[in-house]
Each structure stands twice: as C-alpha cells, then as structure tokens.
Image (cartoon, rainbow, N blue to C red):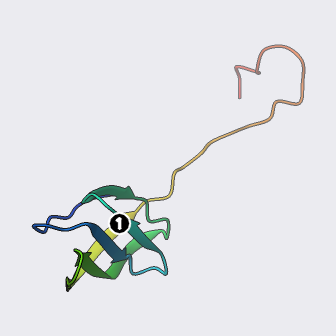
Amino acid sequence: MVNFALSVTNTTKYKIVLGNGGAKEITNGSFTYTYTTSGFNTYVLYVSAYNTDQFVSTIHSITVLVQPKLVWSDEFNTDGAPDSSK
C-alpha cells in the first residue's frame, strides 16, 4: 500500500499513471493505492497536475515490496478435540 501526496499551486485536478496499467484522476492530492504483484517491483509513474488552462507533468520511479500474506489452515476430519500427540 502506497500513500501518495501530490501538491501543485492552483491545481484543480491530478492524473497519475501508476506504472502497472492503472491510472487515477483526483481533485485533491492525497490517495492510497495498493500494488499487488509480489516481490520487489519498480514502477514508473507519470504525474500531471491541471488547472483551468494549463498543466505540468513529471515522471517518478518508485520501488515497492509486496510480500504475500501467509495463511495457515487445516481441516479437522474427526469429531472432538485434536490429537495432542500429533
């Protein structure tokens, strides 16, 4: 999960291309985005800020580590308490 904070004077809208095929358009400069590809991944972000008659843009690169969640489960196939000897 990445928290973004964008700030440009007199901006009415932001557009950010997130480097993984996703894009967001927002009117304030704050949002959170969750990347889902496991491992270390570098994304090139294209950020544009617009007002009524012009825009500015920049490119940034970020590296994100996504660790898979480890889940343990077991299905007990007998009635009663688990066998404490196992």
Q: Looking at the picture, tell me which residue is in the foreground, 59 or 8.
A: 8
Single out the residue that lies furthest toward the front. 52
Q: Residues within 10 Å of mark 1 (few under 14, many from 20)?
A: some
Residue at figure coordinates x 31%, y 61% from the top left? 27
35 relative to 27 in the view: left or right: right
Quarter occupied by residue 17: bottom left
- Could you tell me if residue 67 is visible in this image? yes
Quarter occupied by residue 60: bottom left
Q: Looking at the picture, tell me which residue is in the foreground, 7 or 72.
A: 7
Give residue 54's position: percent from left, percent from top: 20, 84
Residue at figure coordinates x 27%, y 79% from the top left? 47
Residue denoted by label 1: 65
The amino acid type of the residue labelled 1 equals: Leu
Give residue 83's position: percent from left, percent from top: 76, 21
Q: Quadrant of the N terminus?
A: bottom left
**SS for dot 1:** strand
Residue at figure coordinates x 22%, y 74% from the top left? 51
2 relative to 68 in the view: left or right: left
Quarter occupied by residue 23: bottom left
- Could you tell me if residue 1 is visible in this image? no
Give residue 81's position: percent from left, percent from top: 78, 15
Q: Looking at the picture, tell me which residue is in the foreground, 18 or 8.
A: 8
Q: Looking at the picture, tell me which residue is in the foreground, 18 or 10.
A: 10
